[in-house]
Image (cartoon, helix red, strand yellow):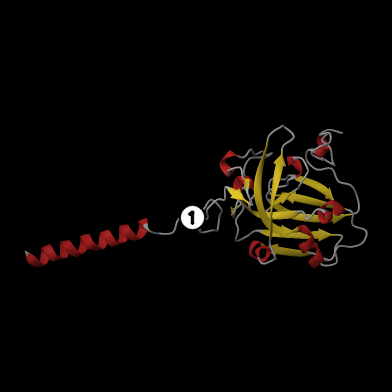
C-alpha cells in the first residue's frame, strides 16, 4: 500500500505545481502583443492635477480600435524625399518629449493629461519634407482622417503621443499613436494613426467634409 500512497502523493504535488504555474503565468495587457509592465498612472505633473484616464471623455466613429503592436507599421509618404515605414519599437527609439495639454471636444467637454511621445518634426527630419509641402494628412485604423498645416505642427512642437499620464496609451485612447493637437478641437486629435501623408493641397477629413472647421482653433468657430 505504501508505494501506491507515495504515487498518489507525487501525483497531487505535480497537479499543484502545474496549477500554480498557470496562476502565475504573465497576464496580457489590453494592447495586443504587450506584456503588462505594472505601469502606474500619474495623477499630478509639475503641480498640475491630471484627469484620470477612466474619467476622460472619448469619441470615435467606429468604436475602439485594437492594433497589434507586433504587426503595426506607421507609413510616412507623399511629398518627402525618403518615404518610410516605422514599427512601434522604432518609434519608441526616437527622443521623447512630455507636455501637459488640455483636450477640448467640440461638444463642450474636455480633460487635461500628461502626454509623452515623439515630435512630428523629429520624424519629418528623417524623411526630409519637400519644400512645396504645406499640409499633413493623418490616416487612422478606423478609416478616420484629418489634416493640419505643416507650419502649425512644426511651430508648436506637436507630438505623436504613445503614453498618457505615464502609462502606455490604452486602446480607447488611441494606441499606438494619438496626435496631441494642442489648441485644436478634439476632432483634430487623430487616434490609432497608421499613415501620415504630406501634400501641397488642402484636405478635408472625416468631420471637416461634414461642415466642421478645417482650422478648428479651440477659441474659434467649430463650423465653417
Q: Is residue 104 left or right of residue 50?
A: right
Q: Is residue 46 left or right of residue 80?
A: left
Outermost residue toward the right in this view: 132
Q: Secondary structure at mark 1?
A: loop
Of residues 103 and 85, the one drawn nearer to the viewer in this rendering:
103
**Residue at 63%, 64% in the rendered image:** 89
Of residues 191 and 182, the one drawn nearer to the viewer in this rendering:
182
Of residues 124 and 10, the one drawn nearer to the viewer in this rendering:
124
Is residue 170 among what the camera can see? Answer: no
Instruction: Give the x, y percent position of residue 162.
Output: 65, 55
Instruction: Give the x, y percent position of residue 179.
Output: 72, 50
Picture layout, residue 25 above or below residue 142: below
Picture layout, residue 217 above or below residue 100: above
**Count of numbered badges drawn on the protein:** 1
Circle 1 packing at 10 Å, graded few (<14), some (14-19), many (20+), is few
**Residue at 21%, 62% in the rendered image:** 11
Outermost residue toward the front in this view: 47
Is residue 67 among what the camera can see? Answer: yes
Instruction: Give the x, y percent position of residue 60.
Output: 67, 40
Instruction: Give the x, y percent position of residue 112.
Output: 66, 43
**Residue at 56%, 41% in the rendered image:** 54
Q: Quadrant of the N terminus?
A: bottom left
Picture layout, residue 123 above or below residue 153: below
Q: Quadrant of residue 9?
A: bottom left
Q: Quadrant of the C terminus?
A: top right
Residue under label 1: 28
Amino acid at each position: 500500500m505504501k508505494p501506491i500512497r507515495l504515487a498518489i502523493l507525487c501525483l497531487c504535488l505535480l497537479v499543484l505545481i502545474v496549477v500554480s504555474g498557470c496562476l502565475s503565468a504573465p497576464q496580457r495587457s489590453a494592447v495586443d502583443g504587450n506584456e503588462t509592465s505594472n505601469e502606474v498612472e500619474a495623477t499630478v505633473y509639475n503641480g498640475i492635477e491630471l484627469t484620470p484616464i477612466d474619467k476622460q471623455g472619448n469619441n470615435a466613429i467606429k468604436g475602439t480600435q485594437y492594433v497589434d503592436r507586433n504587426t503595426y507599421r506607421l507609413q510616412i509618404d507623399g511629398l518627402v524625399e525618403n518615404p518610410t515605414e516605422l514599427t512601434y519599437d522604432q518609434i519608441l527609439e526616437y527622443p521623447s518629449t512630455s507636455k501637459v495639454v488640455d483636450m477640448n471636444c467640440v461638444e463642450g467637454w474636455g480633460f487635461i493629461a500628461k502626454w509623452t511621445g515623439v515630435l512630428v518634426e523629429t520624424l519629418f527630419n528623417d524623411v526630409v519634407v519637400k519644400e512645396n509641402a504645406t499640409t499633413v494628412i493623418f490616416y487612422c485604423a478606423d478609416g478616420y482622417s484629418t489634416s493640419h498645416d505643416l507650419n502649425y505642427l512644426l511651430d508648436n512642437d506637436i507630438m505623436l503621443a504613445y503614453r498618457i499620464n505615464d502609462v502606455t496609451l490604452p486602446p480607447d485612447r488611441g494606441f499606438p499613436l494619438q496626435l496631441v493637437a494642442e489648441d485644436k478641437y478634439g476632432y483634430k486629435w487623430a487616434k490609432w494613426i497608421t499613415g501620415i501623408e504630406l501634400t501641397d493641397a488642402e484636405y478635408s477629413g472625416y468631420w471637416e467634409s461634414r461642415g466642421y472647421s478645417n482650422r478648428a482653433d479651440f477659441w474659434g468657430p467649430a463650423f465653417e
